[in-house]
């Protein structure tokens, strides 16, 4: 019954408004297109958006927060991220505080949560209500909470970490609180069930305003501090400032029984209101126009996912977000707008032309429209048939060619010139002589001058095929022929297939001071020296260009398959002068309000009016860009690194993150909070510790790195918005990859020691094998020496001894013959000496392992009778050790050869011989201070016919040793033999018994006596 009374009262008020001029209500204005100047994007449930959205806000980091029946979500323009895990949350309101905290009001008595430092936690609010209707933050940072579903203590405040509840004692009546507003002057406005109260700064009690309201009302503050109320009775201003005088302003009525459940003023001064069931209402500029403001409505029929809207919000980039039952909607202001008043989807081609005075004319199937500077299109002529061509008519007006006639339209009226025969004009152009040229394909090239029609001779079906026309800078007409133009002089410039070096001429363009043609492969200036060409591979925007016009601010505008682009005219000319020069362009496409493709037809497809606005024709409608109104997004995006995928596990980005051991490949997910056109966000990223170079990507929010090892890394990410504004500092994530057990220092040390031990074991085994082989060879040599000793003893020595005995018998027979004795006794003595020497040799062969090298060398030195006083005593270093038996003779042979050479050839005054028994090697040397050895002798081949050095080298190699010769003319010579210890010494390493050697040396006289 109460609702019926309110409806009757509203109807009576409307009747009074209609009958009594000047009454308190203005007539409802016409509902117009709410999307003019906006592009609408939406994310449906199928695209991951939450349903039944109740609240939208934006946190300090730029992330959009969305709450509703499905829970709490964050949104970066691309991905919805649910917050709170699997916890069942029904969100009724969200508040983003200046501190960065996000306050989350819940329904069904779940109370209040706060998202802080990456965690969602309880705010500890006492006495939770059925749901949180609204929240607000005052200038001190205190959080005010409107608790719905109750009339007692329905307002609460959290300040300084303490909660306080407000009721009748603070001046508030016991009514549910629906809406809160903290005005710029600090006044807190409280919308209750049936009244509005306010709390000015410094006051302890709430003050009544005397304003009566209906339930679910909302407040909004305009740019000048005025407070506006929206309820069932309409929208009106109720105060000029937060704490100002209450007034009853004129209502801006709109047919919405529930009023605006959420309302806000955007940065341009328009008022937006979300309704329960009828979409969103936009009141255009209510401050300036007052009750005469245009009220527009946007619902499901206009492009929203649903007309059930509960939330409306403006982000920091100026986008309007609308939460609905079936998903999320965004309205973004775009530079391209639809020309109002010109019907869309004309069944014939749209036509455009700019008159000399800057007035723009447009045509569609049923009429011609004049677009004056700063004004909307106005139809100036209805046509019986579609307009075929439109072009400037010299200094005044334009030409419109229809099926029946050519019309010249000026500000003062129009003139008609009936066609002499049927033909279809593909385009038209009036040259400097006043002739209007109309290419008509198979119908030839028609022209009109001074009211007289004519046709250029020699053209017809299949001949020439004139298709387009444009006026050159010198006033002549350029006519494009799809075929070949017949030879002969013409008052126009013929552009036929012989000019086609662009992959098929698609655009005949009036460029800056020159003719340009465009095709599939690029843009060319065919009449300029050298015919400069801009290849689409270097300049993609030059391909399939169908329109080009010069603006008022030194820029050029083009229209083609790649959309609309803006370029500095000076840059375009510079690129034509030096193809390959880098130029900057600004591209406009379907994300900027373009809603169709360019027409593939003759005539102007893009024109610039006298007011600077740019108009262009598409297959769907006429569109416009106002260069002065293009907004540049100067807000640098905030960058966030979200997570890292290592193997099959995803890790949230947290400072000091440690990835598992063995990780070699990661996928880093990052994002940037640039919500206007997230598809145009550019990222740069690098991974310090792996790659210092930046990687640049567009519309990609992931970086992949492979071949990583254990260690510390820093991931850095930068981002730029759609207008190229880069974030000032990169987002950084410091993380590390743990070492696997096989990558640790102790394991590597152990592995190195193990490998070293194995190598040493292999080396030892090989050394033992080689030593065994040498010992086997030495044993074989020993056996051979023993065999030779036996043979010598049993044959030669026994034979010699027998001969001595026979000669002794002969000597005894001639004992009385002095002459015979003089001959025989010396011979017998020499034979005795040879016998003793032979026995010693045999003894040496049998007892080579008992020979004392030192004694042998001393004996060798004593035999050098030609060097008394020259040969120094033997020098022995280290404890004498026994050499392998087979090495003794080899060493003695080398020393003997070296010593003989020094004695015979060096002319030295001192010769030194030395032995060194080292732990690593055995060394023997012969050193003199003589004349030295010539270079020829030092060569590997030695002097021809002399083989001493060659023999010494061969013996050294046989011993696994090395022979070194150091000599200089006039400074003497040193010959050194060095043999590694493992190849030189006997195992056991017992010192040689010098006594045994002495006894062996003394045995000769005894044997001689016995003999």
Image (spheres, rainbow, N blue to C red):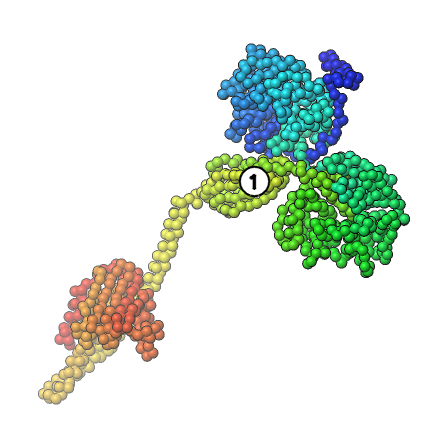
In the image, 326 versus 761, the foreground residue is 326
Residue displayed at 35% across by 60% down: 769
Q: Is residue 668 visible?
A: no
Residue 956 place in picture, x, y as percent? 31, 68
Name the residue beneath numbered marker 1: 726
In the image, 433 versus 211, the foreground residue is 433
**Secondary structure found at label 1:** loop
Residue 194 place in picture, x, y as percent? 65, 14
Residue displayed at 57% across by 30% down: 59
Residue displayed at 17% across by 77% down: 833
In the image, 106 versus 475, the foreground residue is 475
Count of numbered marks: 1
Q: Quadrant of residue 929?
A: bottom left
Q: Residues within 10 Å of mark 1 (few under 14, many from 20)?
A: many
Is 1010 left, or right, of 603 in this rendering?
left
Q: Is residue 406 visible?
A: yes
Q: State which quarter of the image contains the N terminus.
A: top right
Residue 351 place in picture, x, y as percent? 79, 43
Q: Quadrant of residue 3?
A: top right
> Looking at this rendering, what residue extends furthest in the top direction?
169
Residue 183 place in picture, x, y as percent? 59, 22
In the image, 572 versus 637, the foreground residue is 572
């Amino acid at each position: 019954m109460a609702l019926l009374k309110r409806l009757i009262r509203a109807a009576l008020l409307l009747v009074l408004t209609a009958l009594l001029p000047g009454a308190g209500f203005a007539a409802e204005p016409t509902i117009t297109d709410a999307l003019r100047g906006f592009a609408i994007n939406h994310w449906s449930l199928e695209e991951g958006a939450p349903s039944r959205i109740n609240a939208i806000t934006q946190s300090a980091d730029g992330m959009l927060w969305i709450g509703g029946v499905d829970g709490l979500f964050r949104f970066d323009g691309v991905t919805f991220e649910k917050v709170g895990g699997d916890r069942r949350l029904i969100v009724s309101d969200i508040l983003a505080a200046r501190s960065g905290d996000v306050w989350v009001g819940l329904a069904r008595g779940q109370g209040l949560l706060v998202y802080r430092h990456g965690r969602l936690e309880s705010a500890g609010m006492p006495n939770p209500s059925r749901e949180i209707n609204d929240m607000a933050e005052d200038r001190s940072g205190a959080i005010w909470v409107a608790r719905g579903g109750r009339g007692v203590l329905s307002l609460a405040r959290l300040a300084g970490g303490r909660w306080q509840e407000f009721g009748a004692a603070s001046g508030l009546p016991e009514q549910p609180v629906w809406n809160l507003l903290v005005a710029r002057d600090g006044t807190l406005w409280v919308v209750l069930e049936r009244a509005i109260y306010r709390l000015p700064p410094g006051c302890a009690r709430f003050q009544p305003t005397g304003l009566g309201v209906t339930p679910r009302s909302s407040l909004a503050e305009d740019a000048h501090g005025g407070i506006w109320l929206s309820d069932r009775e309409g929208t009106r201003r109720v105060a000029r400032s937060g704490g100002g005088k209450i007034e009853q302003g004129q209502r801006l009525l709109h047919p919405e029984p529930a009023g605006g459940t959420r309302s806000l003023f955007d940065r341009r001064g328009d008022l937006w209101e979300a309704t329960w069931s009828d979409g969103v209402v936009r009141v255009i500029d209510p401050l300036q126009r007052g009750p005469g403001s245009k009220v527009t409505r946007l619902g499901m029929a206009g492009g929203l996912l649903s007309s059930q809207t509960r939330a409306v919000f403006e982000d920091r980039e100026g986008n309007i977000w609308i939460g609905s039952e079936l998903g999320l909607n965004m309205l973004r202001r775009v530079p391209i707008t639809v020309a109002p008043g010109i019907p869309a989807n004309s069944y014939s081609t749209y036509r455009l032309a700019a008159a000399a005075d800057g007035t723009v004319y447009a045509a569609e199937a049923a009429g011609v429209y004049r677009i004056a500077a700063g004004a909307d299109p106005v139809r100036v002529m209805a046509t019986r048939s579609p307009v075929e061509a439109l072009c400037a008519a010299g200094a005044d007006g334009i030409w419109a060619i229809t099926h029946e006639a050519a019309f010249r339209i000026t500000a003062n009226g129009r003139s008609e010139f009936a066609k002499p025969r049927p033909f279809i004009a593909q385009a038209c152009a009036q040259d400097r002589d006043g002739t209007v040229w109309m290419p008509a394909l198979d119908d030839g090239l028609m022209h009109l001058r001074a009211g007289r029609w004519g046709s250029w001779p020699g053209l017809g079906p299949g001949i020439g095929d004139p298709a387009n026309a444009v006026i050159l800078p010198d006033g002549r007409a350029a006519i494009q022929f799809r075929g070949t133009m017949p030879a002969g002089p013409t008052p126009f410039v013929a552009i036929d297939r012989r000019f086609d070096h662009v992959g098929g001429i698609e655009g005949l363009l009036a460029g800056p001071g020159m003719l340009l043609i465009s095709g599939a492969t690029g843009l060319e200036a065919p009449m300029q020296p050298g015919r400069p060409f801009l290849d689409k591979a270097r300049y993609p925007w030059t391909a399939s260009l169908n329109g080009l016009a010069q603006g008022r601010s030194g820029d050029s505008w083009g229209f083609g398959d790649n959309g609309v682009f803006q370029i500095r005219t000076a840059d375009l000319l510079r690129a034509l002068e030096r193809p390959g020069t880098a130029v900057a362009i600004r591209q406009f496409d379907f994300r900027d309000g373009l809603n169709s493709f360019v027409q593939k037809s003759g005539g102007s497809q893009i024109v610039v009016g006298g007011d600077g606005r740019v108009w262009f024709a598409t297959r769907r409608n006429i569109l416009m860009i106002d260069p002065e109104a293009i907004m540049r997004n100067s807000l640098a995006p905030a960058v966030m690194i979200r997570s890292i995928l290592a193997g099959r596990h995803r890790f949230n980005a947290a400072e000091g993150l440690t990835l598992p051991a063995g990780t070699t490949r990661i996928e880093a997910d990052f994002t940037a909070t640039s919500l206007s056109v997230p598809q145009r966000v550019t990222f740069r990223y690098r991974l310090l510790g792996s790659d210092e170079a930046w990687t640049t990507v567009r519309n990609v929010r992931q970086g992949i790195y492979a071949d990583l090892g254990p260690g510390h890394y820093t991931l850095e990410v930068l981002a730029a918005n759609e207008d190229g504004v880069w974030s000032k500092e990169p987002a950084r994530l410091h993380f590390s990859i743990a070492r696997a057990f096989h990558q640790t220092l102790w394991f590597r040390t152990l592995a190195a020691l193990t490998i070293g031990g194995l190598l040493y074991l292999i080396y030892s085994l090989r050394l033992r094998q080689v030593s065994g082989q040498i010992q086997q060879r030495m044993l074989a040599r020993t056996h051979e020496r023993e065999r030779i000793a036996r043979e010598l003893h049993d044959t030669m020595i026994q034979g010699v001894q027998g001969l001595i005995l026979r000669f002794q018998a002969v000597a005894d027979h001639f004992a009385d013959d002095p002459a015979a004795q003089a001959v025989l006794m010396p011979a017998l003595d020499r034979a005795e000496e040879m016998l003793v020497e032979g026995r010693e040799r045999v003894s040496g062969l049998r007892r080579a392992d008992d020979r004392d090298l030192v004694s042998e060398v001393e004996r060798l030195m004593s035999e050098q009778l030609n060097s008394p006083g020259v040969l120094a005593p033997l020098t022995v270093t280290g404890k004498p050790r026994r050499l392998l038996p087979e090495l003794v003779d080899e060493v003695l042979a080398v020393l003997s050869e070296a010593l003989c050479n020094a004695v015979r050839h060096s002319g030295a005054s001192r010769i030194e011989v030395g032995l060194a028994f080292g732990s690593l090697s055995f060394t023997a040397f012969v050193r003199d201070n003589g004349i030295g050895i010539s270079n020829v002798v030092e060569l590997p081949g030695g002097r021809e016919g002399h083989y001493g050095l060659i023999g010494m080298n061969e013996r050294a190699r046989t011993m696994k040793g090395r022979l070194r010769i150091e000599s200089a003319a006039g400074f003497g010579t040193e010959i050194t033999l060095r043999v590694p210890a493992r190849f030189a010494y006997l195992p056991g390493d017992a010192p040689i018994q010098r006594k045994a050697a002495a006894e062996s040396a003394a045995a000769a006289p005894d044997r001689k006596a016995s003999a």
